[in-house]
Image (cartoon, helix red, strand yellow):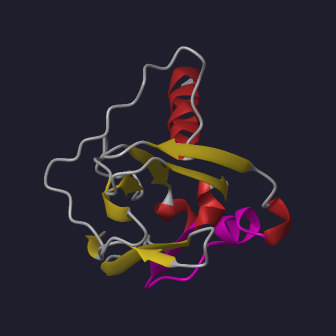
Amino acid sequence: MATNVFRRVLTFLAAMGLTLKDDRPRVIDMTGREWGDPVAGLALSIREAKKEDPQQLPVLSVVLRNTGSERKVLTIPGWLFFYEIEISASPTAYGRELLKPERRTEKLDIALGPGDATEADLPIGLLYEMRAPGTYRVGVSCHLPDGLTLRSNEIDIAH
């Protein structure tokens, strides 16, 4: 039982984008990804992360890719505040608490060379009411430091 609890905590931390010191570098699976329109040499792609257990709540894989020919350096808030999730569901009590503006204290520096990408897993099943059976329309956007808005492709998540 303790092992299962520990495994769930580690899975949750990984979904939040946190890694442990001895984690191997993450390889981003770009196979079959759909992309939103590029803006300022960047593009966003979303898809549902693969589930280890069919009962697992949905996790959204979000990839930010440099489609330009120049290196991009961004200073952003933590992933949960950088990416704005557009979904046909209401936030959970946990989601409302986690996304309070006063929790926006983290800053990340992201450097992407031409063709480079970075991935974040967002635990949307914990953040939004997705327990009821149905199909949920999901998109993600983010505001770039120069004031432009970048949008992902849109997907349907059946749960």
Q: Residue at x 51, y 28 (%)?
A: 7
Q: Which quadrant is home to the N terminus?
A: top right
Image spot of residue 113 (x, y percent): 41, 42
In magenta stretch: residue 86: yes
Q: Is residue 30 above or below residue 122?
A: above
Q: Residue at x 60, y 18 (%)?
A: 21
The part of the image, by quadrant, that contains residue 152 is: bottom left
What stretch of residues is rendered in magenta?
Answer: 83-100
Q: Is residue 58 left or right of residue 13?
A: left
Residue 109 seen by the camera? yes
The part of the image, by quadrant, that contains residue 53 is: top left
- Farthest front residue? 70
Q: How many marks?
A: 0
Image spot of residue 9 (x, y percent): 59, 35
Q: Residue at x 37, y 76 (%)?
A: 138
- Farthest top residue? 22
Q: Residue at x 26, y 67 (%)?
A: 35
Q: Is residue 49 left or right of residue 85?
A: left
Q: Which quadrant is home to the C terminus?
A: bottom left
Image spot of residue 13 (x, y percent): 59, 38
Residue 132 seen by the camera? no
Q: Is residue 13 above or below residue 142?
A: above
Q: Which one is in front, 104 or 133? A: 104
The part of the image, by quadrant, that contains residue 76 is: bottom right
Q: Which one is in front, 1 or 41? A: 41
In magenta stretch: residue 62: no
